[in-house]
Amino acid sequence: MLKSIGATAAVYPCPVLIVGTYDADGTANAMNVAWGGQCGPKHVCLALGEHKTTDLIAEKRCFTVAIADRANLVAADYVGIVSGNKESEKVAKAGWTAVPGEQVDAPVFQELPVTMECKVVSISEELGETCVVGEVVNTQVSEAHLTEAGKVDVSGMLADEPTAGLDAENARAVHALLREAADDGAAVLLVTHEQGAEEYADRVLHMDGGRLSG
Ligand SMILES: Cc1cc2nc3c(=O)[nH]c(=O)nc-3n(C[C@H](O)[C@H](O)[C@H](O)COP(=O)(O)O)c2cc1C
């Protein structure tokens, strides 16, 4: 049973993106962005308020976007609370080591597992936010987060009813993508009522009356 709750942007989970920039003196800065994501085949977008990062992206026309993990939770929160305008040692205080990107003039924080180096495609003012679109020109991934096939390891993927509301064709497409991730080395756990999902699975368990069998 669905219930209307008013106009609520409910795109969850929000990512924990860490955006890296250098200032004119070569000091690295980092900020936390939840309003961002992938918006093209090799493109990321960010919705930014008035921050040091926003100014530096406009100046330098490049930035990095890293994915923070659980090990970096406290540091990721810190860079989302403290501004580089007030704390020039922000990155050091977060406990991160900044190394210049290979393709852009922006820092790569060595403690974060996945970093995309981006060049600015566009900056526009929309809905009171500065919307930045960047093209990913290089991605650095810690070896521990690479599969044997050399792709980003997304192991531990839990997909809970990912095809709810999709038509049959799109449901098959989602299942095929999950299968591909599994073939690339990820452990994928799919919870679904979708008929036909079994075809894509290595192992199928049925839940009946609160008991797992199969
Ligand atoms: C969890 C979290 C998510 C955030 N998401 C955004 C966001 O999407 N856009 C934004 O402009 N600020 C966001 N912020 C706020 C900035 O990260 C924060 O103001 C930061 O200190 C700006 O740093 P800077 O001034 O050094 O660039 C977020 C903060 C936190 C803690």
Image: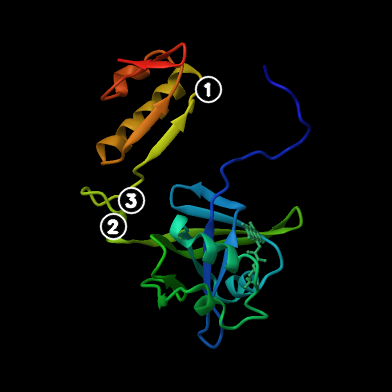
Q: Hey, what amino acid is under mark 2?
A: Ala
SS category of the residue bearing label 3: loop
Which sits in the foreground, 157 or 106?
157
Residue identifier under label 2: 144
Residue identifier under label 3: 152
Q: Earlier in the sequence, mark 3 or mark 1?
A: 3
Which sits in the foreground, 67 or 45?
67
Q: Is residue 212 above or below residue 149?
A: above
Label 2: how many Cα within 10 Å (few below 14, some 14–19, many 20+):
few
Q: Hey, what amino acid is under mark 3?
A: Val
Q: Earlier in the sequence, mark 3 or mark 2?
A: 2
Q: Hey, what amino acid is under mark 1?
A: Ala
Location of residue 131 in the rendering, given as x and y in whole percent from the top left corner: 65, 58
Residue identifier under label 1: 164
Q: Residue at x 37, y 41 (%)?
A: 156
Q: Residue at x 77, y 35 (%)?
A: 7
Specify whether residue 69 is in view.
Answer: no
Specify whether residue 16 is in view.
Answer: yes
Q: Residue at x 25, y 49 (%)?
A: 147
Q: Which image quarter is the N terminus in?
A: top right
Residues under labels 1 and 2: Cα distance? 33 Å
Location of residue 92 in the rendering, given as x and y in whole percent from the top left corner: 50, 79
Residues under labels 3 and 1: Cα distance? 26 Å
User: Along the horizontal axis of the image, is 71 left or right of 81?
Assistant: left
